[in-house]
Amino acid sequence: MENQEQTLKELRASITEIDAMRHVKDISDPEREALELTAVALRDAERVCIAQMQNQLVRDLQAQTASLNEQAKVIRARVTKMNKFPNKVLDNIESVIKTAVKIVAAIARWT
């Protein structure tokens, strides 16, 4: 990636230099045409370099996203597992309390 950044920096410096040379009034038409073709070629190379850098960034982000998605999946599974245990305990406690209430209600009816 650093190599591509350096290449892009050099391309942009060359484009700036060629553009400055193209605007000089004392050059001949063939020289101006050659400079214009060079500028076009440099801009095409710049676009290619930018596209390569973008593609690399996309690949890097996709790799990181895949890793994050895998970690999220593990976390969700652990949270689900953790939530199951308290629910069972709460269900058991609720059942015991309901039974106790029924017993107390029955005792209250007998007295």
Image: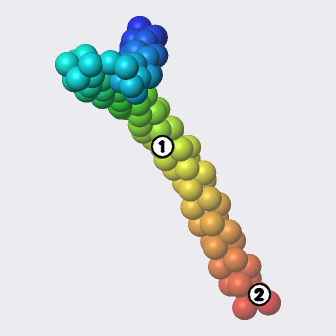
Q: Which mark is residue 76?
A: 1
Residue drawn at the location 57% of the way across and 61% of the way down = 91
Look at 64% across and 73% down and name the residue there.
98
SS label for mark 2: helix
User: What whole-number distance in Å separates the C-alpha atoms at marks 1 and 2?
Assistant: 47 Å
Horizontal and vertical percent position of residue 7: 39, 12
Q: Residue at x 39, y 25 (%)?
A: 25
Q: Nearer the viewer, mark 1 or mark 2?
A: 1
Which amino acid does the dot numbered 1 rest on?
A: Arg
Is 2 placed left or right of 106 in the picture?
Answer: left
**Above or below — where is 83 with respect to 26?**
below
Q: Which mark is residue 108?
A: 2
**Is residue 93 placed above or below 110 in the rendered structure?**
above
Is residue 105 rendered to the left or right of residue 28? right
Mark 2 crowdedness (10 Å alpha carbons): few <14, some 14-19, many ≥20 = few
Q: Position of residue 96 (x, y in %)?
A: 64, 64
**x and y, in percent, of residue 79 in the image:** 53, 44
- Foreground of the two, 80 or 12: 12
Extreme residue in the right direction: 111
Quadrant the C terminus occupies? bottom right
Label 1 close to label 2 by CB (< 8 Å)? no
In terms of depth relative to the viewer, which is nearer, 96 or 43?
43
Who's the residue at 48% across and 43% down the image?
76
Tell me where residue 43 appears, x and y as whole percent. 30, 26
Residue 108 can be seen in this image: yes
- Quadrant of residue 104 in the image? bottom right
First of labels 1, 2 by sequence position: 1
Element under label 1?
helix
Q: Nearer the viewer, residue 59 or 90?
A: 59
